[in-house]
Image (tube, rainbow, N blue to C red):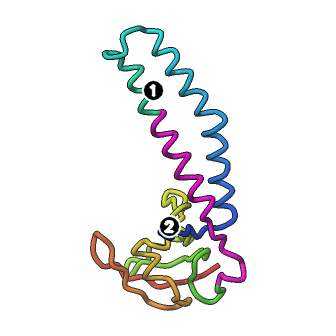
Amino acid sequence: MATEKVFPMTQAGKEKLVQELEYLKSVKRKEVVERIKIARSFGDLSENSEYDSAKEEQAFVEGRITTLENMIRNAKIIAESEMAGDSVSLGSSVTFIELPDGEEETYSIVGSAEADPFEGKISNDSPIAKSLLGKKVGDQVTVQTPGGEMNVRIISIK
């Protein structure tokens, strides 16, 4: 039997996934079923774009439910004690300055399940996080990104 992937995440990240799962099961699933019923009433299903669209949405919702259930079942909560205070680790919030122009950026390093770059949460599997993990305040780090190299200096870790 294959080993299932473990999803490291914060407690808040797990709670967010549980909320999304509950919403999909209790609200979204019912909405999609209702859309399918309405689309069926239009008659011939072979040329019914509303029906096709609703079925595609149903497949997406059911797929997302399965994915969320798997992620929640295999979640590994990052304990506060596992977060090293003096070096960058999973669960850390790290602020760095991009060199040489001095642009300051702050990111929280989280598991891939709760990564959301628009909220400042990057996956521990991302190039930036991989380069920063284990480093300390004051360290200068070269990050390999798809757009080329980026040099940064860590100014704080929380």
Residue located 65% across and 78% down the image: 158
Give the SS element for disc 1.
helix
Residue under pointer 1:
54
Residue reaching furthest to the front: 1
**Residue 43 location, quadrant:** top left
Give the SS element for disc 2.
strand
Say what amino acid the circle numbered 2 marks.
Answer: Ile
Picture mark count: 2
**Residue 110 location, quadrant:** bottom right
Which of 69/88 is in front? 69
Residue under pointer 2:
122
SS assignment for the magenta stretch, majority: helix
Magenta span: 58-83
- The first of marks 2 and 1 along the sequence is 1
Residue located 60% across and 39% down the image: 24
Which of 111/108 is in front? 111
On the rendered structure, is 57 left or right of 13? left
Give x and y (percent) for residue 117. 48, 61
Residue located 69% across and 65% down the image: 11
Q: Spatial distance from mark 2 to mark 1, Cα to Cα?
A: 33 Å
> Does residue 155 sit above or below 93 in this rendering?
below
Residue 64 lies in the magenta stretch: yes
Give x and y (percent) for residue 64. 51, 46
